[in-house]
Image (cartoon, coloured by chain):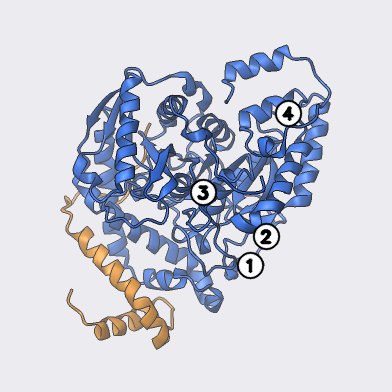
Chain colours: A blue, B orange
């Protein structure tokens, strides 16, 4: 169970500095929350080296089956863990991420470490600088354990044909983990990392977070720097935290959010302490939900779990009401798709000119070649509809605190005829949206289901308040996949 | 826009040349399905009425 920030601080102040004790079983270390690990590390009950080695050992045992990693930065991780250990021993504690193992999607530049985006086009690419997100995590004392799996160039949610095989869903290795932040979600679900980051252009944090039963936040556009991230679409790309609990997610966003001079689209708004929202609760909150026809085509298990989630919020004292989305919601996925592919085609222009034959066997090359033919007027028409939708949605959200939807219309790998997945729209408008576990499927059995919570721009605090209230009232986040040889 | 596949493939080939892409017939054949998907999306977007004052960008505010 996660410590509250108050408990953590009280425990840290009360306990004497102790000798390192025998570490808990490896499986326990694997699933330690960030807050629990931070408390143990700060109080010298657990060393960063022990925690990092436990993760590396578990990766050695399990990742051949899960396939979450493209690159495991073993030597660098142990070096960073030893440095963290020494700093903490000298009393130089940097904060809750100090000594914590983290992984990043293999679109995030890492200095001196290949960044492949799972494409043969970039197989030999070794950046000479860290992405801002990576630099911030390292500055916070985090221990980079590896680069995580994605489909080629982050296109699509999953699929073979890139430079490396696809990741698997730890809850059912025959199922997709979703994507495109596939490895990030799979690694967290399998206990191979304490925290991770992902990227979300069309739902690529929220889709795999739903399918793998973890917590994924797509922050407001501009809340987290995009500097040093392999691009899909400049105006749609978001970077965000992925964790196993809501509190850990808030802590991670604290570390990576904020203005970046290297990213002109990053916001100058001050970054609040997102953990302060965790104790807010939802009593008196106003929650919006979609009208029932918008869930047509959703899997019955998802509909049932979503209704149960709504009932939880009502019991917690929130008021719930159906809302009317803007009419343009019917075409917002088309809008997002045209903006995305036109911008992606522009990013890929040098690759198509010089390395076209190196693309993998996915549809990336096909899609960006076709995207190169979208005219400026067609692109700007899509942008005008996007702007109008965003302005209208801001009006819809004005009288509510958060908007709830299912994370995905169906469990991992199950077909769906849903026409409104509520996923790309939050990339198109840039409003923040988080998913967290809300149950498991019965048909087929045992696949995670997710709840999406969205809010107004830069109101991640409202999301964290609602998410923490829901997580505290339910047990879904505490379940673990039954991977053998734990 | 009721163009045949043959007309669309010729359109793809010539448009691609204007953006510096010299596509083989095989590439045109592969790209056709994506091109048609984009055209369908663009048609649905065109169905949304917009005032002449509509602008393509908006700034997010807290």
Marks 2 and 4, the one that precedes in the sequence: 4
Kindly indicate whether the residues beneath marks 2 and 4 are on one polypeptide chain: yes
Q: In the image, which disc is placed on residue A114?
A: 2
- Sequence order check: which comes first, mark 2 or mark 3? 2
Mark 4 crowdedness (10 Å alpha carbons): few <14, some 14-19, many ≥20: many
Which class describes the residues within 10 Å of circle 1: few (<14), some (14-19), or many (20+)? some
State if disc 1 and disc 4 touch (CB < 8 Å): no
Query: What is the x, y in percent for residue A19?
Result: 84, 23
Task: Decide if residue A18 is on the left or right side of residue A406.
Answer: right
On screen, residue A388 versus residue A401, left or right, reads left
The residue carrying mark 4 is A41
Q: Chain of mark 3?
A: A
Q: Quadrant of the C terminus of chain A?
A: top right
Query: Which is more toward the observer, A351 or A468?
Result: A468
Identify the element where label 2 is drawn. loop
Dot in front, 2 or 4: 4
Give the mark nearest the N terminus, 3 or 4. Answer: 4
| Residue, disc 3 | A171
How far, Cα to Cα, is label 4 from label 1?
36 Å
Label 1: which secondary element: loop
Q: Is residue A448 above or below residue A466?
A: below
In the depicted view, which residue is nearer to us: A94 or A102? A102
Q: Do the residues indicated by labels 2 and 3 lie within the same chain of the protein?
A: yes
Residue under circle 1? A123
Q: Quadrant of the N terminus of chain A?
A: top right
Q: Are marks 3 and 4 in contact (CB under 8 Å)?
A: no
Secondary structure of residue under mark 4: helix
């Amino acid at each position: 169970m996660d410590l509250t920030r108050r408990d953590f601080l009280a425990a840290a102040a009360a306990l004497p500095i102790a000798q390192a004790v025998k570490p808990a079983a490896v499986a326990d270390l694997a699933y330690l929350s960030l807050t629990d690990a931070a408390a143990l590390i700060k109080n010298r009950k657990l060393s960063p080296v022990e925690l990092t080695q436990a993760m590396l050992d578990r990766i050695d045992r399990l990742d051949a089956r899960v396939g979450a990693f493209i690159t495991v930065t073993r030597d660098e991780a142990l070096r960073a863990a030893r440095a963290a250990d020494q700093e903490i021993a000298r009393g130089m504690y940097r904060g809750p991420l100090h000594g914590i193992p983290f992984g990043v999607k293999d679109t995030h530049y890492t200095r001196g470490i290949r960044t492949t985006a799972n494409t043969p086009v970039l197989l030999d690419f070794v950046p000479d600088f860290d992405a801002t997100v990576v630099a911030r995590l390292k500055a916070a004392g985090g221990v980079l354990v590896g680069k995580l799996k994605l489909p080629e160039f982050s296109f699509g949610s999953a699929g073979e044909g890139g430079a490396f095989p696809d990741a698997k869903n730890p809850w059912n290795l025959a199922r997709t983990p979703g994507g495109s932040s596939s490895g990030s979600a799979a690694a967290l679900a399998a206990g191979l990392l304490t925290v991770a980051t992902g990227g979300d252009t069309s739902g690529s944090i929220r889709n795999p977070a739903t399918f793998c039963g973890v917590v994924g936040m797509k922050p407001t556009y501009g809340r987290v720097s995009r500097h040093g991230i392999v691009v899909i679409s400049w105006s749609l790309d978001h970077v965000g935290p992925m964790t196993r609990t809501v509190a850990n997610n808030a802590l991670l966003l604290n570390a990576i959010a904020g203005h970046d001079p290297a990213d002109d689209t990053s916001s100058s708004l001050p970054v609040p302490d997102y953990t302060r929202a965790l104790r807010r609760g939802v009593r008196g909150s106003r929650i919006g939900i979609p009208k029932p026809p918008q869930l047509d085509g959703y899997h019955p298990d998802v509909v049932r779990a979503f209704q149960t989630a709504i009932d939880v919020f009502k019991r917690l004292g929130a008021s719930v009401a159906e809302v009317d989305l803007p009419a343009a919601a019917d075409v917002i996925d088309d809008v997002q798709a045209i903006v995305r592919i036109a911008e992606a085609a522009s990013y890929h222009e040098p690759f198509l000119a010089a390395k076209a034959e190196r693309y993998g066997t996915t549809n990336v090359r096909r899609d960006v070649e076709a995207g190169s033919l979208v005219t400026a007027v067609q692109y700007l028409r899509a942008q005008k509809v996007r702007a109008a939708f965003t302005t209208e949605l801001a009006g819809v959200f004005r009288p509510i605190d958060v908007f709830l939807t299912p994370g995905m219309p169906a469990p991992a790998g199950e077909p769906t005829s849903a026409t409104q997945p509520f996923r790309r729209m939050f990339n198109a408008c840039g409003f923040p949206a988080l998913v967290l576990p809300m149950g498991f499927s019965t048909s087929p059995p045992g696949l995670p289901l997710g709840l999406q919570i969205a809010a107004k721009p830069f109101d991640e605090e409202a999301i964290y308040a609602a998410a923490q209230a829901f997580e505290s009232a339910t047990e879904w986040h505490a379940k673990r996949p039954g991977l053998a040889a734990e | 826009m009721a163009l045949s596949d043959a007309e669309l493939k010729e359109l793809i080939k010539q448009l691609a040349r204007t953006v510096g892409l010299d596509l083989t017939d095989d590439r045109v054949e592969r790209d056709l399905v994506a091109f048609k998907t984009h055209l369908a999306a663009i048609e649905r977007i065109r169905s949304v009425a917009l005032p002449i004052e509509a602008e393509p960008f908006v700034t997010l505010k807290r």
